[in-house]
Amino acid sequence: MTDRRHLPTTPAPVAQRAAAIEAALQAHGLPAADAIEQGLHHAEDVWLPARGARVVAKAWADAGFRARLLADGKSAVAELGIELPKHHRHLVVLENTASLHNVICCTLCSCTAFTVIGLPPDWYKELEYRARIVRESRSVLREMGLDLPADMELRVWDTTADTRYMVLPLRPPHTDGWSEAQLAEIVTKDAMIGVARL
């Protein structure tokens, strides 16, 4: 049994704990420094909402791609060079319409299709959002600035271990004739999560 009298009473700072984990991995022959550098690169330079915005813009502009995206999201985004981790077995794309609004959450933690829509925002990870969006969906959306009409159907989708979701926002009517690049500029991470409409 460990003698607890010799253990520190407060945990080490995060940077110190991270360095200790990295050193332990390195000691076992695992290239932790390279993995950390690669992870930071992906988080800061690759896994950005602009990728999802490009997917949305293509779906708005190309009916064939839109059909493929709704049928098999994972295969469709791969056409654009976007891959999901192996454990993300399915990407389900949820289409918003004039009478239907979709919103996503992860009630257990904060899972998203991060390689497509970017890392989850801080509020998405908070217990209050994760618990309330399921029980009080309209109230939560209203508090976030989205007041849906009472007759609009609202569906909440909870991420699972192998399924990730992405909302395909309703294309704004004033965007007819816009290029895919112009369309991508107006797509936000919040719209792809479903807490905003464009």
Image (cartoon, grey):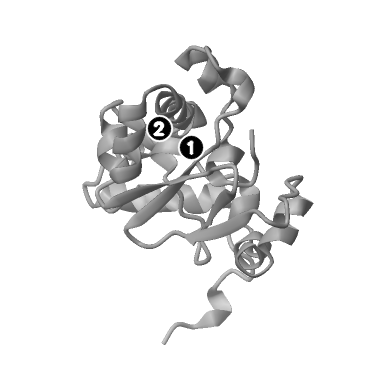
Describe residue 163's horizontal placement relative to residue 118 as left or right.
Answer: left
**Residue 42 tag number:** 2
Question: Could you classify mark 1 by the number of other residues whose Cα lies within 10 Å: few (under 14), some (14-19), or many (20 or more)?
Answer: many
**Residue 142 tag number:** none
Q: Residue at x 36, y 33 (%)?
A: 66
**Residue 118 tag number:** 1
Q: Residue at x 63, y 62 (%)?
A: 133
Q: Residue at x 32, y 36 (%)?
A: 67
Describe residue 156's horizontal placement relative to residue 142 as left or right.
Answer: left
Instruction: Say which element carries label 2.
Output: helix
Q: Percent position (x, y) of residue 112? A: 46, 49
Q: Mark 2 or mark 1: which is in front?
A: 1
Q: Closest to the observer: 118 or 96?
A: 96
Q: Closest to the observer: 120 or 185?
A: 185
Q: Quadrant of the C terminus?
A: top right
Which residue is at the far bottom?
A: 1
User: Compared to 25, does 160 lie above or below?
Assistant: below
Cα distance in 3D space between marks 2 and 1: 10 Å
Q: Percent position (x, y) of residue 61? A: 42, 22
User: Compared to 46, does 154 lie above or below?
Assistant: below
Q: What's the amino acid at mark 1?
A: Gly
Instruction: Say which element carries label 1.
Output: loop
Q: Residue at x 44, y 59 (%)?
A: 159
